[in-house]
Image (cartoon, rainbow, N blue to C red):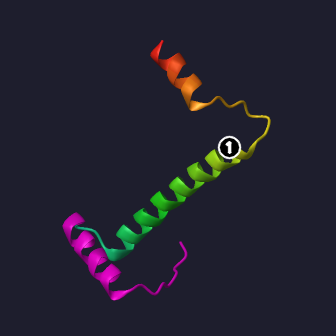
Amino acid sequence: MSQITARLPDEVVSALDRAARALHRSRADVVRQAVESYLEDFDDLSVAIERLRDPADETIDWQEARRVLLA
């Protein structure tokens, strides 16, 4: 496992410490979990943007989708 160093504002460190205490976890555990969650969201968002930019991907407008869903 690799180790990294990051500089964080004091208020972020205070919030991190509060979260770690509340979760009965170490700072490292909370940071690791937060980064993993962020990267999962980033991957999902990247896929969504890629699909939106794909001109071959069929799209329908909101009114048509609403009509179909409510029918």
Q: Quadrant of residue 60?
A: top right
- In the image, what residue occupies the spot 31% across and 83% down? 11
Above or below, 28 relative to 10:
above
**Magenta residues, dominant SS class:** helix
Q: Secondary structure at mark 1?
A: helix
Residue at 52% x, 19% y is 67
Residue located at (43% from left, 68% from top) = 32
Question: For mark 1, what is the residue?
Answer: 52
Residue at the far left: name it: 22
**Residue range of the region highlighted in magenta in the rendering:** 1-23
Counting from the top left corner in percent of width and height, residue 2 is at 55, 76
Query: Residue 14: x, y in percent?
Result: 27, 81
Is 50 covered by the magenta stretch? no
Q: Residue furthest front?
A: 63
Q: Mark 1 Cα within 10 Å, few/some/many (few <14, many 20+)?
A: few
Choose between 50 and 60: the one closer to the eye: 60
Q: Position of residue 10 (x, y in %)?
A: 33, 87
**Disc 1 marks which amino acid?**
Leu
Q: Position of residue 36 (x, y in %)?
A: 48, 61
- Name the quadrant containing residue 64: top right
Residue sitting at the far right: 56
